[in-house]
Amino acid sequence: MSGPVAWETARRVGGLVAEGGVFGGGRALDERAWDRLREDFGWATEEAEALVVAETGLVPAEGPSRGEVLDRRAWVAQNLATFERLLTPVLERWPQRQLPGPLGAVQPELAGAELGLVLGWMARRVLGQYDLLVAERPGADPVSYVGPNVAGLEARFGFPPRRFRLWIALHEVTHRCQFTGVPWLRSYFLDLVEQALAEARPDPAKLLEALGRAAQAVRRGENPLAEAGVVGLVASKAQRDLLRRIQALMALLEGHGDVTMNRAAAERLPEAGWFAQVLEERRQRGNPLSRLLLQLTGLGAKLAQYRKGERFIEEVERAGGRELLARVWEGPALLPSWEEIEDPSAWVARVGGA
């Protein structure tokens, strides 16, 4: 065993959890259903790009968007490959054993199992994903859709498949148009990721400080995981500042994605409001284990942040129209800070007269 994480264990556990295990199984798709998913998402991805470009003016610079349909195991494997590529240089700086006694010998297996558990659980919830970190070269950046999750929701709620699939594609293709249609955004985001990884250091003293802050928050009646899950709890001040920059960017991009999706779907998809309501209720009704994982991973906080991003978009446009909002794409200096995401008028005051 080499390294702090047993990646093969993570893949094995992630695949088992994704396909069943503690979260229950699901109806298997036959080959005909897979063929229909591939055909529909091929069409939906192409159609979504045309609608998003018309709505935003952001034209992908690396060729047309391409959709791919994955099963849950493949989604876990794809994301684990990204994690391994990004985290291996960081983990090489960490001590090989941090736990005392016999636990130190199995620590890589424990870490792999924990990572697999989280990704396997996420694989049961994700509908679509555009992740430029998956791509190792320009143009190799497909928009991914998790077929069983999409088909399961359609069957459960009676969604019309082609319309629901186009609705999902609109949001994910918007992200590809953002990252490949704004010349500087891709490199800026990757630089933030590299900075975050460079700041990662194992420090037991900081963990104790974080536990102290968490205890104080609980005594004040606050949720110490509400801001960014466990990552926000153990981060140093410098790391929290960097995390805020990343959160502000992601809130902007997700808010812009939601607004674009809703506008592009307005005439084509009269069911869009129904789709959105059902998915929001699905998030709210999660079982206790799912709600805990949402908090631990910070995904619960992200959902609230994205709603703030949508409000930021709406308030900026209310103040200065789409012309003012378009200034966020001019360069990193015009991106909103987290404080400006929470108070859009501050961004309007800073940028509106510039």
Image (tube, helix red, strand yellow):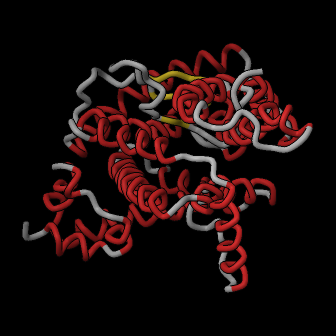
Residue most extreme to the left = 354
Residue most extreme to the bottom = 220
Q: Is residue 138 above or below residue 236?
A: above
Front position in the image: 153 or 123: 123
Residue most extreme to the right = 102
Residue beneath the point at 60% across and 15% down: 35
Residue beneath the point at 24% across and 35% down: 181
- Counting from the top left corner in percent of width and height, residue 303 is at 54, 59
Residue beneath the point at 57% across and 47% down: 201
Front position in the image: 290 or 318: 290
Q: Is residue 282 visible?
A: no
Q: Is residue 266 above or below residue 181?
A: below
**Quadrant hosting residue 81:** top right
- Left or right of 167 in this view: 347: left
- Counting from the top left corner in percent of width and height, residue 98 is at 76, 42
The quadrant the C terminus occupies is bottom left
**Quadrant hosting residue 143:** top left
- Left or right of 333 in this view: 113: right
Residue beneath the point at 32% across and 32% down: 49
The quadrant the N terminus occupies is top right
Q: Is residue 321 above or below residue 99?
A: below
- Left or right of 27 in this view: 272: left
- Counting from the top left corner in percent of width and height, residue 241 is at 42, 61
Q: How many marks?
A: 0
Q: Is residue 193 visible?
A: yes
Front position in the image: 312 or 246: 246
**Quadrant hosting residue 84:** top right
